[in-house]
Amino acid sequence: MTKYITYTSVFAIPIMITIILVHGYVKGVSMYDAFVEGAAEGFKTAIRIMPYLIAIFIAIGLMRGSGAIYYLVRGLRPITSLLGIPGEILPLALMKPISGSGSLAVLQDILVHNGPDSFVGRVASTMMGSSETIFYTMAVYYGTIGIKKSRHTIPSALVAHLAAILAAVFFCKILLSQ
């Protein structure tokens, strides 16, 4: 099973890029002009969302610097033990909705201490690829179009994040345990 997953992951991105280029060629789209236009629009968007990103990065720095995230992990450990979630991935589960780069640092710490081929390393890697940086994404997209009230977005996204964590643990136990 891991052999097929490896082949799929190696060829997925080159195949996707090829499909996009062929589709653009068939539709008669000037790919270079479309790229330049998209890059110019992306630069304008980056400047518009900068205040939201700075606020998110300050919040992340405060959580990590104060150690609040590790006290939260310690408090949640009895619940996660009942669900079969390894305690080592809790910092990643809590950091991933907030920051992609912060969660990469947490993932690196997990992989260094547990190994990439350990169950914890596999669950953490799967979770990293199957969940989203909720608050960062909301800051970017909602900040871009000026939405101030998120309504049901945060609760729905957090439920989806919990489902991603549980699915990562479940599928790693079924597919990758030896």
Image: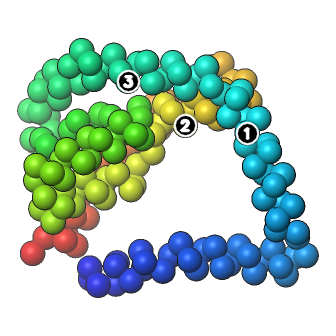
Q: Is residue 153 left or right of residue 41?
A: left
Residue 146 visible here: yes
Q: Which residue is mark 2?
A: 137
> What is the CA distance from the residue labelled 3 to the residue labelled 1?
24 Å
User: Which kind of residue does numbered mark 3 sit on?
Assistant: Ile
Q: Residues within 10 Å of mark 1 (few under 14, many from 20)?
A: few
Q: Nearer the viewer, mark 3 or mark 1?
A: 1
Give the Cα distance between marks 2 and 3.
14 Å
User: Disc 1 marks which amino acid?
Assistant: Phe
Residue 60 got which mark?
3
Residue in the foreground of this view, choosing between 32 and 1: 32
The alpha-carbon separation of the residues under discs 1 and 2 comes to: 17 Å
User: Who comes first in sequence, dot 3 or dot 1?
Assistant: 1
Q: Earlier in the sequence, mark 1 or mark 2?
A: 1
The local secondary structure at tag 1 comes to helix
Whether 54 is drawn above or below 144: the answer is above
Question: Residue 124, image x and y in percent?
Answer: 25, 52
Q: Position of residue 148 (x, y in %)?
A: 66, 18
Q: Nearer the viewer, residue 176 or 116?
A: 116
Mark 2 surroundings within 10 Å by alpha-carbon count, few (fewer than 14), some (14 through 19), many (20 or more): some
